[in-house]
Image (spheres, helix red, strand yellow):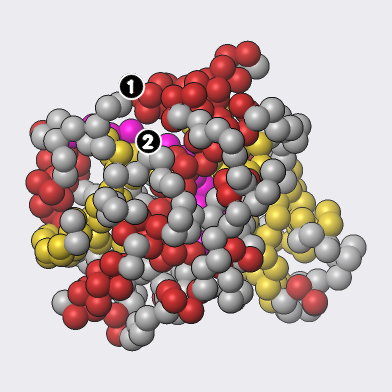
Amino acid sequence: MSIQMPNILIQAFDYPLPESKIAQFPLANRHDSKLLVYQDGLIKHEAFRQLADQLPKNALLLFNNTKVIPARIPLFKENGVAIELFLLHPISDSAPTEQLMEVKGETAWECLVGNKKRWKEGDVLKKGDLAFSWVDREQNHIRISWDTDKSFAQILEEIGKIPLPPYMEREAQVSDAERYQTLFSEKQGAVAAPTASLHFSEEVLADIDRLEIQKAYLTLHVGAGTFLPVKEEDVSKHPMHREQIVFTPELIQSLLQHTGPFIPVGTTSLRALESLYWSGVWLLENKPLENGLLILPKEFVYEARERNYSNEESLNAVLSYLKDNDRNYWVAETELLIMPGYQLRFCDAIITNFHQPKSTLLVLIAALISEDWKKVYDSALSNEYRFLSYGDSSLLFKKQDI
């Protein structure tokens, strides 16, 4: 099949973002943020506390229940040289990351390695009962071993630090351990928070339930690549880092049965939903799996096809695969890059924060509301909105003429 990726220039997604507009700390209460609502080309300004009143009554909100792990591990060589590990993802088969967090004795991860040149092949670094050694220095694969009966999740809680986004330019504080997690964070494995969900308080969730707006939870373990700026002139050439998605058959069934608007909470939820659709297409087209794992390359969704598979066909293909292989979850690695010209399958609106200039997340927003992203961001800047991870929120309805 021929690949027809759009020619999108990243320079078109630049805008001036003063440092003073980047939120360095969260507000006192989760729901105290502002809410910009965009619909039918119009913008209005609300409070996030009133989010439920802005939602269609028959909507399905889809939350990412991933949990941020303390992924930064400070180490020192015997001579005092500092080395820092930033855990990216475990080196394993198709098991969900949250299961691999419970291993005992030994694990292996791909990492970013600070001061790597000072850590030679064969050197073993120690930290208490832990030993760190190279599995593959070129690939940044590191073995971590310990003699206690603790799980890796317990080990990390003791030695790791919450990895705040680089644009915060500060060390994580004790309060970040709670505020950089959502109220429903459950599945351990992310190295960045699904920040659109940080605004949801118990009160807002109660309002959503009172109005009988449906909720569902999926998992995408957010990777460090979410912070990488696009350095290529052509967005399609940007290397998308893989992120793991996990869906249960029950959730897939609920997507099939829902007849109202789909509203993903955050770009991570949207990418997970769209990746699930393309997982089904992969199976329908009899593409191979690698040891039972689908690795969805960014080019796949832009291949020219004679058929346009329906959502129902695609999701049923995933359910059939799970049943035939006696599996109780669908797990895949996605490189999905959503750009203008992409046909959204599971998004009538999105709840999301305000993103960095020249980022894949901002390009994704343009796929939803086209050039009106400029109007939205100009309005947010003019009205003193706070930007990025701890910033304010928006509810953006899909532009109908896209």
Q: Which of 264 and 101 lies nearest the eye of the viewer? A: 264
Q: Which residue is mark 2?
A: 217
Q: Magenta segment, which residues?
A: 213-229
Q: Earlier in the sequence, mark 2 or mark 1?
A: 2
Q: Please state the horizontal and vertical placement of residue 398, each as a whole percent of the image.
A: 28, 51
Q: Tell me how many marks there are.
A: 2
Helix, strand or loop at mark 2: strand
Q: Is residue 172 above or below residue 296?
A: below
Q: Please state the horizontal and vertical placement of residue 236, each as a whole percent of the image.
A: 59, 63
Residue 367: image quadrant is bottom left
Which of labels 2 and 1 is toward the front?
Answer: 1
Q: Is residue 15 above or below residue 60?
A: below
**Residue 215 lies in the magenta stretch:** yes
Say the numbered circle drawn on residue 257: 1
Helix, strand or loop at mark 1: helix
Q: Please state the horizontal and vertical placement of residue 264, each as a whole percent of the image.
A: 34, 45
Residue at horizontal 25 percent and vertical 69 percent from the top: 376
Q: Is residue 195 above or below residue 387?
A: above
